[in-house]
């Protein structure tokens, strides 16, 4: 990927009355943080050229996963809704927490990056870097990855 474009116009949140989604809330949301982290892990060239569009404002920036907080500490609609949604008939239904899905994605990304760099002679230092910073990006998530990859057999 050579450029990342995020469209963040101010719009009302679909499930949370009174909440407006915009560029500021995009940076706070767990899934959006995961998008940038995934792109950062998949790149070997550092910061990501990006264009962030918020309404009529456009901001060309360099995104770097090191500038973001961990996805697991971000906001999730499922948590804000108390893990319950109401259907069109007014019946409530429990929903799973997205933290488990996010943890699985990050575990896979980190493990793949570590394995990829470990196989390359010139990438061994990047393997060590991802092992070292993996726990930071897994903060707030239900995961055993740190014990198995960072300190254990991985």
Image: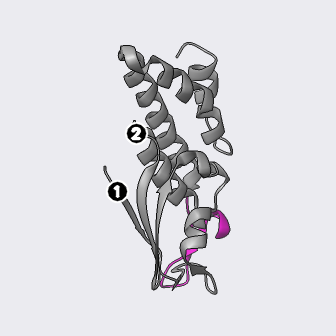
- Count of numbered marks: 2
Q: Residue 84 location in percent, x, y? A: 61, 68
Task: Give the SS element for disc 2.
Answer: loop
Could you say which disc has been placed on residue 45 in the image?
2
Q: Point out the stretch of residues depicted in magenta.
A: 79-96
User: From the viewer's perspective, is 63 left or right of 20?
Assistant: left
Taking the magenta stretch, the answer to whether it contains residue 136 is no
User: From the viewer's perspective, is 71 left or right of 44?
Assistant: right
**Residue located 64% across and 23% down the image:** 147
Residue 130 visible in image: yes
- Taking depth in this image into account, of 83 and 123 the one nearest to the observer is 123
**Residue located 49% across and 85% down the image:** 89
User: From the viewer's perspective, is 147 left or right of 65?
Assistant: right
In the rendered image of this protein, does residue 129 appear above or below residue 53? Answer: above
Q: Residue 121 location in percent, x, y? A: 37, 13
**Residue located 43% across and 51% down the image:** 48
Coloring basis for residues? one colour
Q: Residue 154 location in percent, x, y? A: 52, 17
Residue 144 visible in image: no
Q: Quadrant of residue 133?
A: top right
Q: Earlier in the sequence, mark 2 or mark 1?
A: 1
Neighbourhood count class around disc 2 (C-alpha, 10 Å): few under 14, some 14–19, many 20 upward: few
User: From the viewer's perspective, is 127 left or right of 25?
Assistant: left
Q: Which residue is mark 1?
A: 3
- Taking depth in this image into account, of 22 and 12 the one nearest to the observer is 22
Neighbourhood count class around disc 1 (C-alpha, 10 Å): few under 14, some 14–19, many 20 upward: few
Taking the magenta stretch, the answer to whether it contains residue 84 is yes
Q: Quadrant of residue 112?
A: top left
Q: CA distance from mark 2 to mark 1?
A: 12 Å
Circle 2/circle 1 CB separation < 8 Å: no
């Amino acid at each position: 990927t050579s450029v990342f474009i995020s469209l963040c116009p101010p719009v009302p949140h679909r499930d949370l009355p009174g909440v407006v989604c915009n560029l500021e809330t995009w940076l706070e949301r767990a899934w959006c943080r995961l998008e940038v982290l995934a792109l950062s892990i998949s790149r070997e060239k550092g910061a990501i050229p990006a264009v962030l569009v918020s309404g009529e404002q456009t901001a060309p920036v360099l995104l770097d996963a090191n500038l973001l907080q961990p996805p697991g500490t971000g906001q999730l609609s499922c948590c804000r809704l108390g893990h319950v949604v109401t259907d069109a008939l007014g019946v409530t239904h429990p929903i799973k927490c997205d933290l488990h899905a996010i943890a699985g994605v990050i575990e896979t990304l980190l493990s793949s990056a570590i394995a990829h760099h470990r196989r390359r002679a010139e990438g061994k230092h990047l393997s060590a870097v991802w092992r070292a910073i993996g726990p930071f990006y897994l903060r707030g998530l239900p995961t055993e990855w740190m014990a198995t990859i960072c300190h254990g057999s991985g």
